Image (cartoon, rainbow, N blue to C red):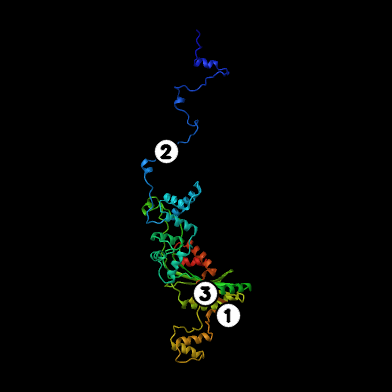
Amino acid sequence: MSYPDPLPGPSEVKDLDPTPRSPQVKESGPTPGSSQLRNPDPSNEPSRPKKRKRIPDPPSFLLSPMKKRPVSSHLTENEKTIAINVYKYINKTMVSYPYKTEIIKRTAEIIGTSEKTIQRVINEQKNPRPPSAKPRKIHQLFHDQELPTVDKVLRAVNDDEDLPSFKRSTMNRILKKLNFKYSKRSRNSVLLDRPDLIIWRTNYLLRNKDLRSQGRKIYYMDETWVNEGHTANYIWVDQDVESCRQAFLNSLSTGLKNPQKGKRLIVIHIGSEYGFLEVATLFLNPKKLTVKAITIAKWMLTISKNGFKISLQTWSRGSVIVMDNARYHSSQLERLPNMGWRNAEIQEWLRIKEIFFKEEETKAHLMAKIDTNKHTKKYFVDQCAATKNITVIRLAPYHCELNPIELIWAQIKSYVGRNNKTYKLTEVKQLLQV
């Protein structure tokens, strides 16, 4: 009885493999007990990013119901943007053609608000309200001569059925976004192009352009003031020095001291693109901060008579002088009556001018007779300049930026501030004369 051959063992299977094999070479390397194996070189190993372990969410967090937004609070702009994005995403990713109500319901569940709120946000996105609705509420308060406050604007907006209701803090943010600023009220109101100023400015610019086209030289007159403590506004400050003792121990200083304003020096000058007139300089040191009209009138008299006779000899005839409408620039040869005069004074003036009037006429009727006879103001400077064939034109009120000499004053005051060391009036005067 013959038995089948037994299955070959593992070693016999290797011998039965017909594929030839190359002889195995034993690589030389560190032995298990060597130091290279204990301290491998980290630079030779490839860098592998460390995997962050994912912390699973606790079951209580996943099983808890979704929280909804409080009903009393309105959606912010960012929340409205998120709601619109969720609505668009659901509309694109749903397999079947969805109904609009299903999309709104699913969006409301994700955002945590009501379906009505989502519908209102979508309607606002499709039909945005005009941005001028809220500013009109504020300007309506201006028209009604009322002080606009946040509470008044909030009440006006919330009472309007066409506008949504807001909280006081939200209304405060809306006012800032609408470029409204809560600032201090000033007595010097900002002029927003009064009709009379528009006409005055236009006439001045057209006349100035016409005189330039004729080749006439234009001189500009203006005044400025400089305090004896005038200095630079910006300097380098060592922020590490916090006390006088610290500066003394470190052999440092506490920096420059801030001088007092001190006395004021007023400078009046006339100049053109060819430079200033040397004989036309006037320095005043008034005790008060205002220029007295009498002092300026005397100086104007000197400039008009002596100055024009001496300095205007170098001027070509037909020159032009530009000045502003300051009271001491506009000294009248003869004062015209105004509503501040008494009736008897106006009647006496009319008798001198041989203008007929009745004794029983009121002040308004008397003033109307002066206007109908076309009596205009005549200035002392204009008459003196006319003798030398020189024209005087005046800037429009509140338009000092049209006088180029203002740029020169800025440079001069900057120079004085950088070089003023003693903060004395004599040094300031010397710096102005350099």
Mark 3: few/some/many CA within 10 Å (<14, 14-19, 20+): few
Q: Which residue position holds label 2? A: 54
Mark 1: few/some/many CA within 10 Å (<14, 14-19, 20+): few
Residues 45 and 104: in front is 104
In contact (CB < 8 Å): disc 3 and disc 2: no
Query: In the figure, 62 relative to 191: above or below?
Result: above
Q: Secondary structure at mark 3?
A: helix
What residue sits 37% from the left and 40% below the top?
Answer: 59
Q: Secondary structure at mark 1?
A: helix
Q: CA distance from mark 1 to mark 3?
A: 30 Å
Q: CA distance from mark 3 to mark 2?
A: 73 Å
What residue sits 43% from the left and 86% below the top?
Answer: 342
In contact (CB < 8 Å): disc 1 and disc 3: no
Badge 2 amino acid: Arg
Residues 181 and 310: in front is 181
Dot 1 or dot 2: first in sequence order is 2
What residue sits 47% from the left and 92% below the top?
Answer: 358
Dot 1 or dot 3: first in sequence order is 3
Q: Which residue position holds label 1? A: 386
Query: In the figure, 434 relative to 9: above or below?
Result: below
Give me the disc on residue 72: none
Q: CA distance from mark 1 to mark 2?
A: 95 Å
Horizontal and vertical percent position of residue 325: 50, 75
Q: Which residue position holds label 3? A: 195
Dot 3 or dot 2: first in sequence order is 2
In front: label 1 or label 3: 3
In front: label 1 or label 2: 2
